[in-house]
Amino acid sequence: MELLEERIRQDGEVYPGNILKVNSFLNHQMDIGLLKEMGDEWARLFADAGINKILTIEASGIGIACIAGMSFGNCPVVFAKKSKSLNLGKDVYTAKVESFTHKNVSDVVVDKRFLSSGDRILIIDDFLANGKALEGLMEIVNQAGAEVVGVGIAVEKGFQGAGDRFRSQGVRLESLAIVDSMDAETGEIVFR
Ligand code: 5GP
């Protein structure tokens, strides 16, 4: 998506450790007009998918998913919570997710009331790096007996390989910007 690539080129900041910061328009301050364009693009790309629910993960997926929900005709949005509780109970679906940015492992939970068999789920997240967050969300959808009919990612770091791995497994994955390389010294970002 040209608009998002342009914005990343203009305002994205490349940090050592393969971190791209987009705090001025996506991950801290949020450009709602841009988010609406992104939601509309996913709605166009997944128009035939019969999506009835959007699933994301806290925290930074929530804003993006909510605006996308409006593009999908007020589609309900569920966000998986990161929990430190050891006693998670029977009423939740859970998966373990290792954080790319913090390197810790958290239990990610969704209340069983909010996902059901028969749901056709679009998973949305801000970044795709090694794919751990996405794997966890897919595992939760699987536990619910629901179906992941699509995955919408704002920024895929293509050089980390997870996107192509999911695609080769048949996952319908649409990333709005795919970064092929980035350089923390020069700040240069190359898109696929
Ligand atoms: P993965 O689980 O695919 O390794 O990482 C995805 C998650 O880590 C995303 O939910 C995102 O919050 C975070 N993340 C991964 N890489 C980056 C990055 O380069 N910049 C930012 N801001 N977040 C990232």
Image (spheres, helix red, strand yellow):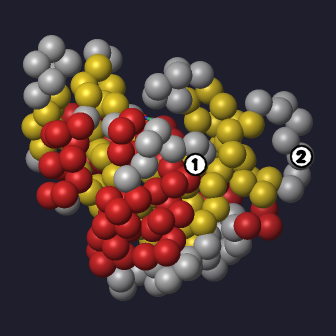
Residue behind mark 2? 89
* Residue drawn at the location 26% of the way across and 57% of the way down: 176
Q: Position of residue 70 (x, y in %)?
A: 49, 75
Q: Say whether mark 1 is within 8 Å of ligand 1.
A: yes
For disc 2, the neighbor class at 10 Å (few under 14, some 14 to 19, many from 20) is few
Q: Is residue 141 left or right of residue 7?
A: right
Spatial CA span between label 1 and label 2: 20 Å
Residue behind mark 1? 57
Q: Quadrant of the N terminus?
A: bottom left
**Label pair 1/2, CB-CB below 8 angstroms:** no
Q: Is residue 17 visible?
A: yes
Kind of element beneath mark 1: strand
Name the foreground residue: 61 vs 3.
3
Query: Which mark is drawn over residue 83?
Result: none
Which tag, 1 or 2, sits closer to the chain's start?
Answer: 1
Kind of element beneath mark 2: loop
* Whether residue 45 is situated above or below residue 47 in the rendered picture: above
- Inspect the image, locate mark 1, and give the three-letter code of the amino acid beneath it: Ile
* Residue drawn at the location 55% of the way across and 53% of the way down: 62
Quarter of the view holding residue 45: bottom left
Q: Is residue 116 left or right of residue 164?
A: right
Name the foreground residue: 178 vs 73.
73
Q: Quadrant of ligand 1?
A: top left
Q: Say whether mark 2 is within 8 Å of ligand 1.
A: no
